Amino acid sequence: MNQPNHNSPWQKEFLRVFLAISMIVVGITHFVRPEQYARIVPPQLPYPFELVYISGFFEILGGIGLLIPLVSVAAAWGLIALFIAVFPANINMTLNNIQIDGIPHNQAFYWARLPFQAVLIAWAWWYTKKPEQQPGAKQVIKQTGTLISEVAATKDS
């Protein structure tokens, strides 16, 4: 009996789109309901609303970047950095039992979601390899090569 391939390209791409859309949606909520996120910014950090807007911007940018071949590797590394950067807010939320709308207000749930940050980091890390093999990459490479050739021909004339 054949075993299913758990790392099939289709599954990986489906999960890429899912992560990208999730990041974009969560990033947008940083602008729609910034007070929710500002509450969990550790008090030691200045300008909580500005930090919320910055993190929201980079969540949206990272989500969009994951969908663009050849940029997706940089976007994945950026998301890894973002997941690490916002971890203190998740710790603050857990230690101080701070409620955010849309997340169950349950201390056990807050503790259980802390290790999920490692899952998000691993998920993003999965997309840091072989950008040239990603769907659409060959077309981008071909179009970029054609554009570069045209620009070089224009400069030579």
Image (cartoon, grey):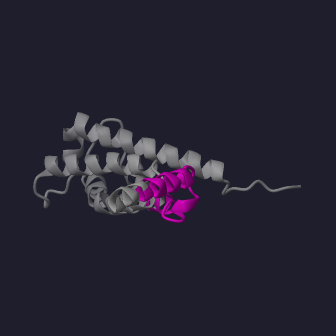
The one of 37 and 145 positioned closer to us in this rendering:
145
Q: Residue furthest front?
A: 157
| Percent of width and height locating residue 122 | 49, 62
Position of residue 25 relative to residue 51, above or below, is above
Q: Residue at x 50, y 43 (%)?
A: 18
| Percent of width and height locating residue 86 | 29, 57
Magenta region: which residues?
121-149
Residue 4 appears in the figure: yes
Residue 104 appears in the figure: no
The one of 64 and 96 positioned closer to us in this rendering:
64
Residue 156, quarter of the rendered image: bottom left
Examine the structure image and report whether residue 72 is included in the region drawn in magenta: no
| Percent of width and height locating residue 151 | 37, 56
Residue 81, quarter of the rendered image: bottom left
Q: Residue furthest right?
A: 1
Q: Residue at x 52, y 54 (%)?
A: 142
Magenta residues, dominant SS class: helix
The one of 48 and 20 positioned closer to us in this rendering:
20
Question: Left or right: where does residue 8 sit relative to residue 2?
Answer: left
The one of 117 and 23 positioned closer to us in this rendering:
23
Q: Residue furthest left?
A: 46
Quadrant in which the N terminus is drawn:
bottom right
How many numbered marks does the figure carry? Answer: 0
| Percent of width and height locating residue 72 | 44, 56
Question: Left or right: where does residue 135 sit relative to residue 38?
Answer: right
Position of residue 38 relative to residue 101, above or below, is below
Quadrant in which the C terminus is drawn:
bottom left
